[in-house]
Image: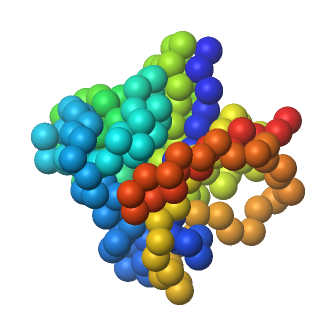
Amino acid sequence: MGKVFTHMTMSLDGFVADPNDQVGELFEWYEAGEVTVPNPNETVSFQVDDASAQALRELTGNCGALVAGRRLFDIARGWGDKHPAGAPVVVVTHRKPEDAATKWPTTTFVDGVEAAITRARQIAGDQDVTIASATITQQALDLGLVDEVCVSLVPVLFGEGIPYFTKRDRHQLLDDPIAIQGRRALHLRYPVRR
């Protein structure tokens, strides 16, 4: 069985988007190099430096399913049913889109974080599950469902916006980080202590 990771690109002051859900300079690292990292979504391209290419491959190379919240899914327009991680998406929502079966046939919609992680693990099999949503990450951490927290930390201060982490239900200790210094991003992986 694979691990459950979280991954978000975050500003130095802890935000994954500005107050209007825009990422601004957060995603500059995806275009800051000469190395092309292929993905199945033809509308998204990654041109990163060597170090960031290594980090990106580590995050996506063994991804068997991705979990996102409905808000992120709507903002990204469902990634056109082809998430750049190259894995099926499980969306946590209380209201499934009416055209889900025809518009997003590889996307699964479930009610609740625990159900989403369970379904994503079934889909992923021996591969990893990646959570790519701040609110879902926080809830999954509180439920003890996360094995590793990953952050691509970028050199920008937003001052306000959508935080990666907010008030949590419990204290969580992480192990020492594994760090990869890329251009425009410091990629950090923190194993969760049990």
Q: Is residue 190 above or below residue 65?
A: below
Q: Position of residue 2 (x, y in %)?
A: 59, 20
Residue at image location 84% in from the left, 50% down from the top? 173
Residue at image location 32% in from the left, 48% down from the top? 49
Q: Position of residue 130 (x, y in %)?
A: 51, 37
- Nearer to the camera, 39 or 72: 39
- Name the image colouring: rainbow
Residue 98: tell me if it is visible.
Answer: no
- Nearer to the camera, 39 or 91: 39
Residue at image location 56% in from the left, 72% down from the top? 12
Residue 182: tell me if it is visible.
Answer: yes
Say which quadrant the N terminus sits in: top right
Question: In the image, is 140 to the left or to the right of 175?
Answer: left
Quadrant of residue 106 within the rendered picture: top left
- Nearer to the camera, 99 or 82: 82
Q: Is residue 167 above or below residue 55?
A: below
Q: Position of residue 34 (x, y in %)?
A: 21, 47
Question: In the image, is 92 to the left or to the right of 40?
Answer: right
Say which quadrant the C terminus sits in: top right
Residue at image location 24% in from the left, 41% down from the top? 35
Q: Position of residue 113 (x, y in %)?
A: 61, 43
Question: In the image, is 190 to the left or to the right of 75?
Answer: right
